Amino acid sequence: MITKSDLSSPNSWVSEVTDSKISPFSDKLMLNHIVILISAAVGYLGAGLSVSQRRDLAVEYGKMLAQVGLYAEDGAELLIKNGWLEQPPMAENRDKLAKE
C-alpha cells in the first residue's frame, strides 16, 4: 500500500539475516557496549533517585542501584580478566614535574 502510493517504505530486514555462524562483532566490542549501557543505567537511576519525592521509590531506586552496581562490577572484572580495560588518560604528576 505504501509503495503503491509512491511513499517511501522502510527497508526490508530479510537482507539483514544470514546463515553465518560467526558473530559479526567481537566479544570485546559487545562487552564494552554492555558496560557503557550499564553506566547509562546507573546515571538514569541516580537521576530518578535525585528527583523522587516518594520515600518508597527512593528505597527501590537504592536497591536497583545496588543490583546494577554488582552487574557493572562483573562487567569490569571481565574486561580486566581479558585485558580489554584500557587505562584512561591520567593527569601529570605536578610535584614530579616541579622537581625536574
Image: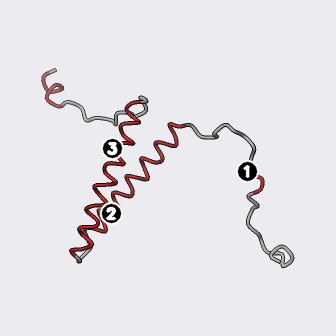
At a point 30% along the width and 66% down the height, the residue shown is 47
Quarter occupied by the N terminus: bottom right
Residue 46: numbered disc: none
Q: Residue 62: x, y in percent?
A: 25, 62
Question: Nearer the N terminus, badge 1 or badge 3?
Answer: 1
Q: Residue furthest top?
A: 100
Q: Amino acid at mark 3?
A: Glu
Q: Amino acid at mark 1?
A: Val
Question: Nearer the N terminus, badge 1 or badge 2?
Answer: 1
Question: Nearer the N terminus, badge 2 or badge 3?
Answer: 2
Residue 73: numbered disc: 3
The residue at which mark 2 appears reads as 45
Count of residue discs: 3
At a point 24% along the width and 69% down the height, the residue shown is 58
Secondary element type, mark 1: loop
> How dense is the environment of label 3, judged by Cα within 10 Å: few (below 14), some, or many (20 and up)?
few
From the viewer's perspective, is 96 left or right of 75? Answer: left
- Of residues 44 and 17, the one nearer the viewer is 17
Secondary element type, mark 3: helix
Q: Residue 22: x, y in percent?
A: 67, 37
What colour scheme does the image use? secondary structure
At a point 75% along the width and 62% down the height, the residue shown is 11
Secondary element type, mark 2: helix
Q: Residue 16: x, y in percent?
A: 73, 52
Spatial CA span between label 2 and label 3:
16 Å
The residue at which mark 1 appears reads as 17
At a point 28% along the width and 65% down the height, the residue shown is 61
Instruction: Classify 5 as above or below 81.
Output: below
Instruction: Classify 86 as above or below 44.
Output: above
